[in-house]
Image: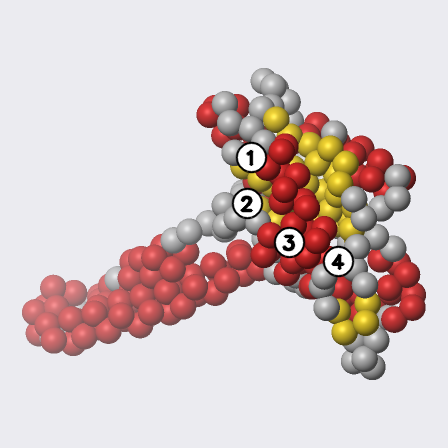
Amino acid sequence: MFDRVPFFSRPRRGHRRARALQGVFLAVFAPVGWLALQALQGVSPADVARAHPGLMAYMLLGTMAAFGVFGWLLGREEERLSRLAMLDELTGLANNRLFGARLEECLVASRRSGRPLSLLLVDMDRFKDINDSHGHQAGDLALKTAASVIRSSIRASDVAARIGGEEFAVILPETGTKEAADVAGRVLSGLRGADVRLGDGTMVNLSASIGLSGGIPASGESGFALFAQADKALYKAKETGRGRLVTA
């Protein structure tokens, strides 16, 4: 469930600029190639350049412009695909790979600054019943609604991710467990008040259990250790009645 292999935490920036520059560089070979062909036919490249300066400039500048624009468009598409590779397709939250990398980054930052770091694991209660009773489309709607509630309950600097079928995680940088419990309370309250209406008018009630772990990580402590603590707390929340928060 938690991917321990390090990945880049965010899409590489500058694809457009890099591809545009590569296109401009490759454009130089257009007039050079034409001069080479002339040389193979026994015509001096210097004589050709002197005889047709306008044509040479047109070939160089026109090709540079065309290749540069093509490279920029290619880079833009690469950036879009990079972003998609880091996001969960259904909810738009970070996916498991991005979550793992960001958690490790936040651990390093927490140790460096001496500020606490908290982690919430949010697992939808009785989600299988929703799928079995109302179908997978209802389950997808429930997940999207839960993601919206989580997103609206956290700060822009926090990281919300979908890390499993019906399990979410929230990384709360520079946040102690008391403040993180307040965030968890907002999530639980938001889910209970969420209006999930199916196409036939049926209302689906949402609930979740949350495990919380946090503090200032010790030297050498990995994100997996913090995750395991929150996972144990989540398991206890499930055991003791669901729809509640348990702190490790």
The mark closer to the camera, 3 or 4, is 4
Q: CA distance from mark 4 to mark 2?
A: 22 Å
Label at residue 158: 2
Residue in view at x 41 percent, y 56 percent = 15
Q: Please, is residue 172 above or below residue 215 in the view?
A: below
Please report whichever mark, 3 or 1, sits nearer to the chain's N-terminal start.
3
Q: What's the amino acid at mark 2?
A: Asp
Other-residue count near label 2 (Cα within 10 Å), few / some / many at <14 / 14–19 / ≥20? some
Sequence-wise first label, 1 or 4: 1
Q: Is residue 227 visible?
A: no
Asked whether the beta carbons under mark 3 and mark 4 sit within 8 Å of each other, the answer is no
Which badge, 3 or 4, comes first in the chain's sequence?
A: 3
Camera-near label (2 vs 1) is 1
Tag on residue 192? 4
- The amino acid at mark 4 is Arg
Residue 150 is labelled as: 3
Q: Amino acid at mark 1?
A: Thr
- Element type where label 4 sits in the image: helix
Q: How crowded is the residue under tag 1: few (<14 C-alpha within 10 Å), some, or many (20+)?
A: many
The answer, for residue 228, to whether it is visible in the render is yes
